Amino acid sequence: MITPTSSRAQSLVSRGSSSTMQKMGMCKQGLRGLRTCLSRSTPSSIGQGGRRGGQCLWAPAQEQTGVRGLVTSMAAAASGDAAEQKFDYDLFTIGAGSGGVRGSRIASSYGAKVAVCELPFDFKSSDRLGGVGGTCVLRGCVPKKLMVYASEFADHFHDSRGFGWSPAESIQHDWTHMLEAKRKELTRLNNAYKNTLGNAKVDLIEGRGKVVDAHTVDVDGKRYTAKHIMIAVGGRPTKLDIPGAEHTITSDDALELSRRPDKITVIGGGYIAVEFSCIFHRFGSDVHLVFRQPMPLRGFDEEVRKFTTDQYAASGLQMHPFMTPAEVKKQPDGKLTVVLNAKDGSKVEIADNDQVLMATGRAPNTKNLGLEEAGVQLGPKGQVIVDEYCRSNVPSISALGDVIDRIQLTPVALMEGMALARTVALNEPTKPNYEAVPSAVFSHPELAGVGMTEEQAVQAHPNLDIYTSSFRAMRNTLSGSPLRCFMKMIVDADTHVVLGAHMVGDHAAEIMQGFAVAVKMKCTKEQIDSVVGIHPSSAEEFVTMRSISRKIRGGQPA
Ligand SMILES: Cc1cc2nc3c(=O)[nH]c(=O)nc-3n(C[C@H](O)[C@H](O)[C@H](O)COP(=O)(O)OP(=O)(O)OC[C@H]3O[C@@H](n4cnc5c(N)ncnc54)[C@H](O)[C@@H]3O)c2cc1C
Ligand SMILES: NC(=O)c1ccc[n+]([C@@H]2O[C@H](COP(=O)([O-])OP(=O)(O)OC[C@H]3O[C@@H](n4cnc5c(N)ncnc54)[C@H](O)[C@@H]3O)[C@@H](O)[C@H]2O)c1
């Protein structure tokens, strides 16, 4: 059973043990009041930066041993448990990415004394560099989406002609301007996240964290003890071990290129491969997408995959299915040739690339983290093996986010962080709820879905009604874009509950976030049908799909 010092402190406060608090010279308002009292009398230095290398950057000295120290010793005094005093912190988090920041901040808000360590900031990650905000903010969701926004203007300018606009032929994109604007925004976000931690009274320690034992973390030579350790170190891009891999780039590099590649080959068929292919393609690069499967985006609904693949082809992306990368060769002129093994055994070459992007997956950052030495069980990819409460086999060590390799999405890491905060700081063991997690691929066209794919639904429900709709969005009637929209709803024919909803088309992510509520709440098809549409919109199609496209009965097409 988890019994954090902080939860005792909390219950002490809620029980109103004012005598203990008064003995310790505290305010009567309890923990929150105590913080307010001290912060009023303490000039705030949060956010003013500070020393590096294992030193607390943001919390003033009084706070490092002050308020939070009192939280621990208050609990110790109350419980008479001398062992409580030996920990510097209730919770020590390694990694200030999406999950680490959220988990630390929320645990602190519950009264725990929390520290988080994070590598120094850089736009590209390495064993020694990272930065507060983590992958999503600095090398993932945010810079990627900024690049998506930047690239989609190309289509807007093109499409505007159909509506009577004559964009100047000389219209140009300034890559350097975009790069600098992106870097400025990421630097702002990095500081904003630091301030968030400071405001939440979480001690931020800059440096590389390493687990020493079940209750000790080393940060660049300085040791900290903690009742709980949270591993939130995320992952990093990997490259295939093929000859010439050193000539290729990863997604970190792709977000930092100093100029647009005229020609790029992207290896992989997952989220990153597809999203970056579409970004570069919209910017005008000649893009070749290489993957082993017949279609990219394995794991998505097969019909949606097929539709999306056709749309990518219609938009001009050059796709190379059934191809296994064998080698990357540097040409005498410095350009790159990708050598592929085709399914029939022949070799195919894609020459004259300015860049070759390897988007073949990510690996958990558990190398040299001291976990195995501390007895923590790791999986074959190096992921931390955790139970349904995100706890490892060592009871004081938990892990969340990409490092556990469950669902590598920011909102999932946030959810796990919030659950873990409750578990360790409030002593309320809380499981993250992975039901109906929506996701989107920010490709062109965009794709998003929630709930089951048809393939998953067939396994779990023998009788299904499948509703689909494919249409040309109104915008594209005049724009001339060949792209179409696709929507799909998978309904349990026995209960009429909507099991899954999927969309390909403009604003799919925005639209499906709303439908995710309906799917998670187990709405029936009748309830969806009872909703009045918003006209004219693409989204209204979801509430007007009345004809069943396909029936499945007893697991077979009917
Ligand atoms: C290109 C790309 C695009 C993405 N797009 C999306 C998207 O659109 N939507 C979405 O939901 N998800 C997206 N993701 C996934 C998302 O970024 C991750 O799921 C999310 O960041 C995971 O959060 P985390 O807290 O587990 O890890 P991270 O955010 O990776 O944070 C881990 C932190 O730990 C630090 N660290 C590592 N080792 C140590 C150490 N020893 N000591 C101290 N600190 C350490 C790292 O520097 C890092 O800051 C994308 C990912 C990539 C790569
Ligand atoms: N929009 C989003 O939400 C978003 C965007 C980007 C990334 N992400 C998250 O980041 C994670 C990582 O993304 P990713 O695209 O790197 O990983 P991924 O697992 O989605 O895709 C990896 C791709 O590499 C291919 N591959 C693996 N080994 C290979 C080999 N030996 N030869 C050829 N191909 C090989 C796989 O078949 C797959 O197509 C995703 O799982 C996703 O959860 C999310």
Image: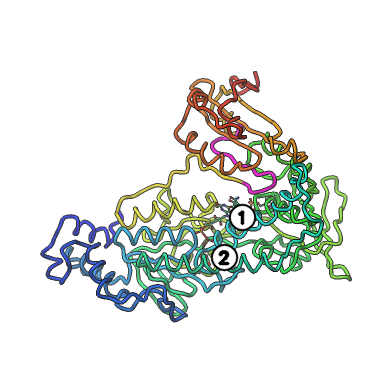
Q: What residue is shown at x 39% (from left), y 69% (from top)?
A: 198
Nearest to the observer: residue 470 or residue 320: 470
Specify the farthest residue to the left.
19
Q: Which numbered dot is residue 185?
A: 2
Is 452 situated above or below 224? above
Residue range highlighted in magenta: 441-454
Residue type (three-letter) at the residue carrying disc 1: Lys
The image shows residue 207, relative to residue 442, as above or below, that is below
Q: Residue at x 77, y 59 (%)?
A: 171
Q: Is residue 394 shown above or below 187?
A: above
Is 58 on the left or on the right of 383, as rendered? left
Instruction: Say if residue 91 shows up in the picture.
Output: yes
Q: Residues within 10 Å of mark 1 (few under 14, many from 20)?
A: some
Residue 294 visible to the viewer: no
**What percent of the width, then of the height, locates residue 6?**
27, 61
Say whether residue 23 is magenta. no
**Residue 67 locus on image (x, y percent):** 27, 70
Instruction: Identify which amino acid the numbered label 2 is placed on.
Output: Glu
Quarter of the image for residue 279 reads bottom right
User: Disc 1 marks which residue?
Assistant: 145
223 displayed left or right of 135: left
